[in-house]
Amino acid sequence: MTKAETYGFYNQTRPCNMPSGWAFLGPCAAGNVPAGGTAFALRPYRNFRVVVSFGRNDSTGAPFVIGEATGRDDVAGRLNGVLDFPRYGSVPCVEAARTPIECSGSAILYLLVINMQNVPVTFTSTPRISVGNATVFARQRWCYSNTLAPQSARTDVSPAPSAPGGLRVPSAVYIERPPLTASRNGRLVLEPVPIAQRYASGGAFTVFAISCS
């Protein structure tokens, strides 16, 4: 991701609860990501079985955290005490070039990814995301991965509103990441997209929303 697509800070004692941020109340996994990549398998949750696999990157074993939520009643808190969690469909959707588009379907799952070290990490692609759920995927469904980002592509934050301490809270959009992918046999596999994903230092994070129709 670009720097413009990351904002926020982590809490080392409760890594999926960001101070002055959002708390993902589903399962949470933490571990180091070597330069060759690694996979995080989250515990089963609401019939979901999720594995997030990271590919090659420029770190030497950076600690990362993955949080999971469905978005129904399991995301709490406000970013910088101001911004409620922007559920998919409640804010605009755009293409990678920031052209407005109609949001595709509805979100079935959200994944929070946090860089926990004070050094930026850049991946050569988006992660591979495998989601199993025999109920949700009882029939074939077509899905996208979407990335939460500040509305402005030029800076990390939007002009307003201001939060306590002089910080500014970004207004958000979801960036749709093709290709459109079909579930098969109760499972959805979103393959990596070969675009650079940069996680700035100091607990920078992003959120992936998986939307299906």
Image (cartoon, rainbow, N blue to C red):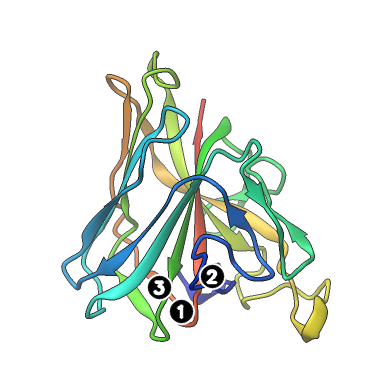
Depth check: 103 or 46 in front?
46
Q: Residue furthest left?
A: 36
Whether pointer 1 and pointer 2 mark residues with C-beta atoms closer than 8 Å, the reply is: yes
Q: Is residue 182 left or right of residue 93?
A: left
Name the residue carrying label 2.
6
Residue 182 screen position, x and y as percent:
35, 27
The disc labelled 3 sits on which kind of residue? Arg
Residue 9 screen position, x and y as percent:
56, 74
Residue 43 screen position, x and y as percent:
36, 42
Whether pointer 2 and pointer 3 mark residues with C-beta atoms closer than 8 Å, the reply is: yes
Cα–Cα gap, marks 1 and 3: 6 Å
Q: Which mark is residue 198?
A: 3
Disc 1 element: loop
Rendered view: 87 above or below 39: above
Instruction: Answer few, some or many: residues within 10 Å of disc 2's Cα (few below 14, many 20 plus, some between 14 and 19).
Output: many
Whether pointer 1 and pointer 3 mark residues with C-beta atoms closer than 8 Å, the reply is: yes
Rendered view: 111 above or below 73: below
Q: Quadrant of residue 1?
A: bottom left
Closer to the chain start, of discs 1 and 2, is 2
Disc 2 element: loop
Q: Which mark is residue 28?
A: none
Name the residue carrying label 1.
200
- Residue positioned 75% across, 77% down in the render: 168
The disc labelled 2 sits on which kind of residue? Thr
Residue 58 screen position, x and y as percent:
25, 78
Answer yes or no: is residue 96 visible: no
- Residue positioned 52% across, 65% down in the render: 14
